Image (cartoon, coloured by chain):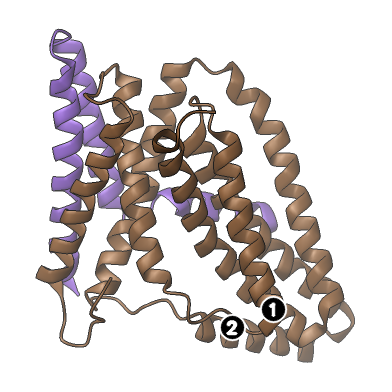
Chain colours: A purple, B brown
Amino acid sequence: MSMPGAVFRELLGLFVDDGSLALAILAVVMLAAISVALIPDIPLMAGAILVFGCLGVLLANLAIAARRH
Amino acid sequence: MGNWAHIAPALTAAFLASLVEAVEALTIVLAVATVRGWRPAGLGATAGLLSLALIVAGLGPLLDRVPLHLLQLAIGVLLLLFGMRWLRKAVLRAAGVIPLHDEAAAFATETAGLREQASRHEARLDWLAALASFKAVLLEGLEVVFIVIAVSAGRGLLVPASAGALAACLMVAGFGFAVHRPLARVPENTLKFAVGVMLSAFGVFWTGEGLGVAWPGADLAIVAFAALFLAAGLGAVTLARRPSAEAVP
């Protein structure tokens, strides 16, 4: 592979290894952003969505990966 | 410069992450040096370091122009993707679901690859060897640069985070060149686990700040998030553990 190709692949690989985990994280961030837009008076709601959403996504992904292997 | 509680998370995250990346880069540079000598290995590594310096010099002024909330949000999301990816892999390795990364095996594979290239392209081998060294330093270094920028951006912590990263790189280079062997006994998965926890915590914090969340306790919230990710990670290791797995992540 060419050097720019290898660098691009490596850069992408920094952030995306398991595609479903990356998509789930982005979905949690989107939910938090929607919560800020819809309920601007309670920004901590978005914070709670972020914290517990990310933890939930991680645990669910690990459970699936452990079962699959 | 802020107080120690403000500086410590960024410095520690940059130090530990850089330790992991430097060990991986050193393995390849040592493999190149073993097969073709220190000249191509050193030239490639130096060129990689210079390229990294150019990238940092180019990126720095650009980042200053990005609005703070946008920068926090972008870096926060990237940190979440990066940190949770590391944490996921570290948990699966600690639980024995996937094999541990083995620096000695990586060194053997790289050395064998270079020797195989030697049999095919003897005339160009010094160039190919230098390129392998260059790629290793550039690609692993990019991760270090990203982590340093991500944990320090917008908080005036670039100097302590860079110092942490530099200390790790110098330490690994010093040990590596002293023993002339890959640092296979570094507890790489434990480091990755710790860094994954810290970067995920930073990611939640920055993403929230970018969205306008005022975290209770300000910077101290990062410590609370790290504790939650640590508990979740350790719990997941226990639940997913296979009989042959190591005792500690």
Amino acid residing under circle 2: Phe
Q: Quadrant of the N terminus of chain A?
A: bottom right
Q: Residue at x 54, y 18 (%)?
A: B66
Residue B73 position, x and y percent, is 38, 26
Q: Residue at x 90, y 82 (%)?
A: B123
Q: Nearer the viewer, residue B182 or B222?
A: B222
Q: Nearer the viewer, residue B182 or B216?
A: B216
**Is the C-beta separation of discs 2 and 1 under 8 Å?**
yes
Is the residue B120 above or below the residue A56 in the image?
Answer: below
Is the residue B110 above or below the residue B201 in the image?
Answer: below
Residue where numbered disc 1 is placed: B30
Q: Quadrant of residue B78?
A: top left
Q: Quadrant of residue A38?
A: top left
Give the residue furthest to the left.
B239
Residue A33 position, x and y percent, is 24, 21
Q: Is residue B80 left or right of residue B43?
A: left
Q: Residue at x 64, y 75 (%)?
A: B175
Q: Is residue A29 left or right of residue B147?
A: left
Is the residue B186 above or below the residue B68 in the image?
Answer: below
Crowding near pointer 1: few (<14 within 10 Å), some, many (20+)? many
User: Would residue A8 be seen by someone viewing this image from the given angle?
Assistant: no
Residue B163 position, x and y percent, is 61, 46
Residue where numbered disc 2 is placed: B107
